[in-house]
Amino acid sequence: MDTSSEGIRALIVDDEPDVAGVLSRVIKNCGEYETHTRTQHFDVRSTLLALRPDVLFLDLVMPDMDGFDVLREAKETLPELSVIIVSTHSTVENAVRAIKQGAFDFMTKPFDPDSVSLMLAKIESELALRARCRALRTALETHDPFLRAILGDSPNIHSLREWILKVRGVRANVLIEGESGTGKELVARAIHGDNGPFIAVNMAAIPDSLADSELFGHRRGAFTGANTDRNGLILEAHGGTLFLDEANAMSPHIQAKLLRAIQEQKIRPVGSDREIPIDVRIISATNTPLDSQAASGDFRRDLYHRLRVLATTLPPLRERPGDIPLLAQEFLERYARRYAKRVRRFSAETIDILQHMAFPGNIRQLENMVEEAVILTSDTTYEITPELISLGTISHSTETSTRSTHPRTLADAELAHIQRIMRITNGNKTHAAKILNIDYKTLLRKLSLLDPGEAVP
């Protein structure tokens, strides 16, 4: 039975109904609290997301639930949830183990009202501190254009912004890893802030023969075509940040010269007989794990450690589907202004489809899809519908039909198109039928024409 009143929300998980009931009454007597109890096996994730408790009182030893499993899933679902272990004297060791795994504190059974009141006071202080931290963080993010550019409301994006604020004022080198299209340069610019020049270079786009001169500069006459002195990108970044995108593409020669520059804080331009002092923070980015390349010998291990003083890995878009509506709307408004279109929103069906896509190209792929959909809208279109998104997704799909790349008949082409739409919707026939503008039964009939080996998800 659940008892409700205003105030902090508490969830009590204990297989003994009498114990759970007593604790609920004691908690209510301590102030304005909302209490919920669970005395049998329950779905931890869905319950926590529905109740959003501030504190969880958890018994570790229960016949039909493993308390440590509940603790682990609770912290994964609500990382800031305060978990209080309610333990008998014989399981204090387990309680200590739970503290090490993220629990806030523990109480021993039998408990008295004073201990419960004291625990609730600690929780209230903790919640008040978190509220102040969130308010400060929100104020900083609101007034920081670089942080505002990192869109998203998922926990990992909030954590990323907090991490950026911590490392921004430190001159240590940073390594950013993540799949293509996850926004590594955007994060690099946020880390840099407005602290001096920000010079970005894609190492994969510079030929090996030019990389030395591009990075370190040259003196007139150093080689054929060097008609004037030139400062390299490292010197242009003096007092600020040098962003090395696709840093793993550096040749062994450039790796060796960069390592020496970092160690000595000096560079020697090509053709020069003197060294120039530098003050540069290097932020590197790769779309493949650099540690594995260092382990295999494809990248200098000593340089890897010099570049990776601080590090972060950006989450792919498929791990933050809740951010897709926010990102898609931002791109829609941006390109509607650019192309003078009247479209203003996405239909609910379109958002649902987008949130179920894999997005191997991540944010960049989503942006391209939205831009294409906006371009294809008519002057009277105010809403992006699934039909428009389907036009923008077929060319981006990484899946291919098991049929011939060039269907031989119109029927083959139709079935190939149906397969692509089914992959886009992750096998959701209802959504696929809406995109194809056919009824559900017609879709089922057409899918039945596929060979068993060509089954779609």
Image (spheres, helix red, strand yellow):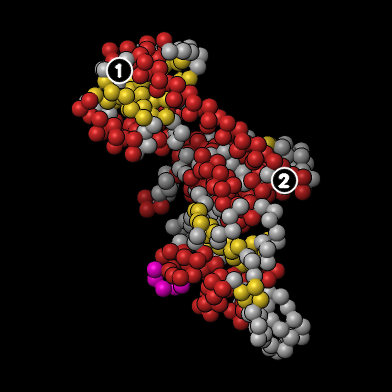
Q: Which of the two residues, 57 or 136, is positioned nearer the viewer here?
A: 136
Q: Classify 64 as above or below 165.
A: above
Give the residue type that dot 1 points to. Answer: Phe
| Residue 224 drawn at (x, y percent) | 70, 89
As helix, strand or loop, the secondary structure at mark 1 comes to: loop
Give the alpha-carbon distance from disc 1 to disc 2, as whole Å.
Answer: 58 Å
Q: Which of the two residues, 408 or 326, is positioned nearer the viewer here?
A: 326
The label on residue 334 is 2
Q: Residues within 10 Å of mark 2 (few under 14, many from 20)?
A: some
Tell me if 108 is positioned left or right of 126 in this view: left
Query: Is residue 331 visible in the rendered structure shown here?
Result: no
Q: Classify 99 as above or below 363.
A: above
Q: Classify 280 as above or below 315.
A: below
The label on residue 111 is 1
Residue located 35% across and 19% down the image = 115
Highlighted magenta segment, given as a residue range: 295-300
Tell me if 41 is positioned left or right of 53 in this view: left
Query: Is residue 309 visible in the rendered structure shown here?
Result: yes
> Residue 135 colored magenta?
no
| Residue 205 drawn at (x, y percent) | 61, 71
